[in-house]
Image: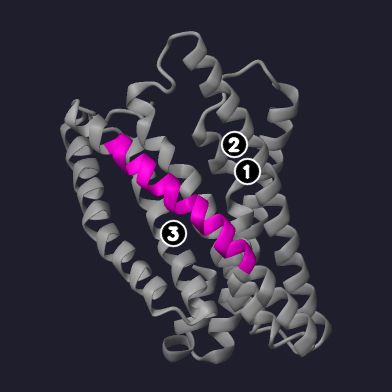
Amino acid sequence: MGSATGIIGPDFLGHDVAITVSLTLWILGTALGLVTYVVMMIRLVRDAGMATAMPFWLMPVVPPMVSATTGAAVSTHMPEGAPRIAVLIFCYILFALALTAAIGILIAVARQFARNRSAGVDVIPFNAIPSLWIPLGVIGQSIAASNLLAAASRHALSTEHADTLHEFGIAYGTVVGIIGVIAFVTVTTVTIHALRRGLDFSLGWWSFTFPIGACAVGANAFGVATGSTLILGIALALLTVLIPIWATVAVRTVRSIRSGALPAAA
């Protein structure tokens, strides 16, 4: 909301009011995201090996990556010089924090799945299959952050440093994007198979929405950075797919609330 207000708010609220609201909301959201991040990291250290690692463990550590992505736009509203550079540096720190935690959690999840497979049990509970989409959210969001921050750096840093960050964004987006394509095809196949087997609706179905949206944002940022019309087309396709999926989940949620039979996520 903070980032969006800074982009379209000036046309409705006036420049000064919109930027003030934008910065305020972004700071509050970032602070709240850091709280969930710290709490989750403490629990991971305290309960290491005592709980069953699941993909939805990523949810509390993703917010700093979202703040890093939206911070790229926020930084352009800061005064030139030290304030703008400070916001960019802070956003890259948020990027690193979220990425480090995500990698650690994904390793723990992969080990848990391997143990489940070797024990002859389901790799993941059937009703928790939608949570397999959550890692895609991290992938898409991180690609967006690395490339949007690189673009924003051109308004704050020297051409040489900005070019270095641009090259990093391209390299990161290429490597992680390939992983993302493989993961996207895999989880789509698993999900279709689960739906055919009668996967019941639950709040976990919202796990289908954010990751697809994050992948669309990531693809768009990467497409702009590389000048690739193909990747920009993929971003548009993902957004087009997201709309009916979001609408379906929203309608099913409302119906469940009205019937008083809203099932919890697994």
Asked whether, in this view, residue 29 is left or right of residue 118, the answer is: right
**Residue at 62% across, 62% down:** 172
Between residues 47 and 110, which one lies in front from this camera angle?
110
Q: What residue type is labelled 2?
A: Leu
Q: Give the range drawn in magenta.
A: 171-191
**Residue at 25% across, 46% down:** 249
Between residues 112 and 1, which one lies in front from this camera angle?
112
**Which residue was labeled with disc 2?**
106
Examine the residues drawn in magenta and state their main secondary structure.
helix
Label 1 Cα neighbours within 10 Å, binned few <14 / some 14-19 / many ≥20:
many
Q: Are marks 2 and 1 in contact (CB under 8 Å)?
A: yes
Callout 3: SS: helix
Q: Quadrant of residue 126?
A: top left
Q: What residue type is labelled 3?
A: Cys
Asked if residue 230 can be seen in this view, the reply is yes
Asked whether, in this view, residue 142 is left or right of residue 167, the answer is: left
**Residue at 39% across, 21% down:** 125
**Which residue was labeled with disc 3?**
215
The quadrant of the picture occupied by the C terminus is top left
**Which residue was labeled with disc 1?**
102
Q: Does the magenta stretch include residue 175?
A: yes
Q: Do the residues labelled 1 and 3 touch (CB within 8 Å)?
A: no
Eyeballing the image, is 107 above or below 115? below
Label 2 Cα neighbours within 10 Å, binned few <14 / some 14-19 / many ≥20:
some
